[in-house]
Amino acid sequence: MKNLFIAKEIKKAEHPTSTTTRRVEGGEYITEKTTYVAITKLAHAECGHVFEVEPNRRQPQYTCPHCGKSSRTLIASKEIRKEAKEMDVTDYYGTPFDCTGSSILHVSENENGIRFSNQTTTMVINGNTVDVESKEKTYLEFILGQRTTGMKVMKRTEDKAIDAFEACGVNSHNIYNVECVYDGFDNAEEFIASSKWLSKINFLDILAHINVSMSFNSLLVLTAIVLSSYPQLELLLKMKYYKLFNDILTVLQRAYNKQMLASEIKRFERLFDIEATKGKNAMRLPTYIGEYLQARNADIEEYLVWCDIYQLTSMSKENFLELLNSVDFCKMSINKCIKELPKIIKYEGYSNVLKVCKYICKNNRLHPTHVCHLLSDYLELCSLHDIKIDLFPQDIEKLHDEVFIYVQGKRAEEKNNNLDKLATQVEEQIKPKNDKILSEDDLVAIVPHSVRDFLNEASQQRNCVGGYYRKLSRKPTTLVTGMKAY
């Protein structure tokens, strides 16, 4: 029988009257306030004993006075819940905590690995006892060395592949403490200590080397999700890449919604080679770069940056060591400019990373970070507008501003051409069909042909018409001004 309590009856009881005294001008002002509480009659489902209790937020655990067993689980029927909702009791915090239809993650071990099964628990109240029924909704099979995904149980078709976080019921609200039930064990510590699959990845050793603020349940579930997505990380953990794993958990922990959880774990595809079977090939980086990052306790973002640099340049070990020993690279590293390099070296002519670093650092007037931003922005503008790139200009700030002004003028010209074309079409549609002689009462339609026409019209009318051209440039419509003919 389940060790839980059933709400059998609820009644309203008056709380002792509280008196408040305030000093006011001319004497004292005394107020009396009467509050109410809910006295709930509970039945212990395990021993059947019935007793009364006053539910309290400060005492969420209930103890049976007959057998002495305690439980936090308190369930109630729909009738009791409806009655509690209708009662006006200010100090009532308890019933009903409804377990009917609630989901909980069941963790079990089998011959293949560890199964995380998200099940819906239905508790049917039968007198003073409870019948419990569980139905599996989603699950995740964690198998060492294999890439697996979450599955949704379907009634009439084969199980459907879903996101691993969804399969385990993990979201940004419960990621710090995922509620789990361990089949055959009382808690997470007992399960972790006896699991043969967790011992193969040295899970206890991993826990000793990471520093993430979350429960054992969450650590176990997130480890299974990450290793199911990237089995190669298991090989790296055996090579003691604990800081890398710690940062991955931290990034997931900071996600503010389930979409960000899914996008963050997918972002790590840039780093891992999903077909690798050896630790030295687990990352899309050569061992000499991986060992360098591991030795300096680099964070996950630095791993991703170096992965991009290597994919763009295929840097040899000799060139890498030469780069590390250069003064310019050290200067960029101190100023945290390394993350800007992939935005620059992806363009043709910038594959020599050391040469790029020397160019960025030779400008004593500008900060290296500012030079990186100017150069990357300049290259992007040239690429988008088919402008010939000056690879290493003498004055990047001046050249960047010139290109920016040119691009702005080109965009304005394009915008004016679109407005002029639209205005010409409108004029053709609204012009008089015959050569009518206009009088004083007639209106003449004036259609603006450029941004300057809009601004002039706004200046004359002293209103916000000048800003309409932005909307008109995006939509097939225009503005017509009516003016007297004379």
Image (tube, grey):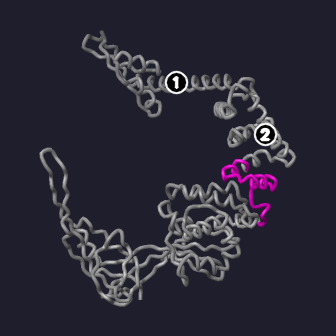
Farthest residue in the front direction? 27
* Dot 1 or dot 2, earlier in sequence: 2
Image coords of residue 245 (percent x, y): 66, 61
Q: Which residue is mark 1?
A: 417
Q: Position of residue 136 (x, y in %)?
A: 49, 77
Which secondary structure lies at badge 1? helix
Q: Is residue 349 visible?
A: no
Residue 322 quadrant: top right
Compared to residue 443, the image places residue 316 above or below, namely: below
Query: Disc 1 to disc 2, how far (Cα)?
Result: 42 Å
Instruction: Give, as a three-letter code, the residue at label 2.
Output: Val
Q: Residue at x 32, y 16 (%)?
A: 483
Residue 250 x, y percent position in the rendering: 59, 57
Q: Quadrant of residue 221?
A: bottom right
Judge whether residue 286 is colored magenta: yes
- Residue shown at 19%/55% (left/top)? 21
Residue type of the residue flagged with mark 1: Asn
Magenta region's main secondary structure?
A: helix
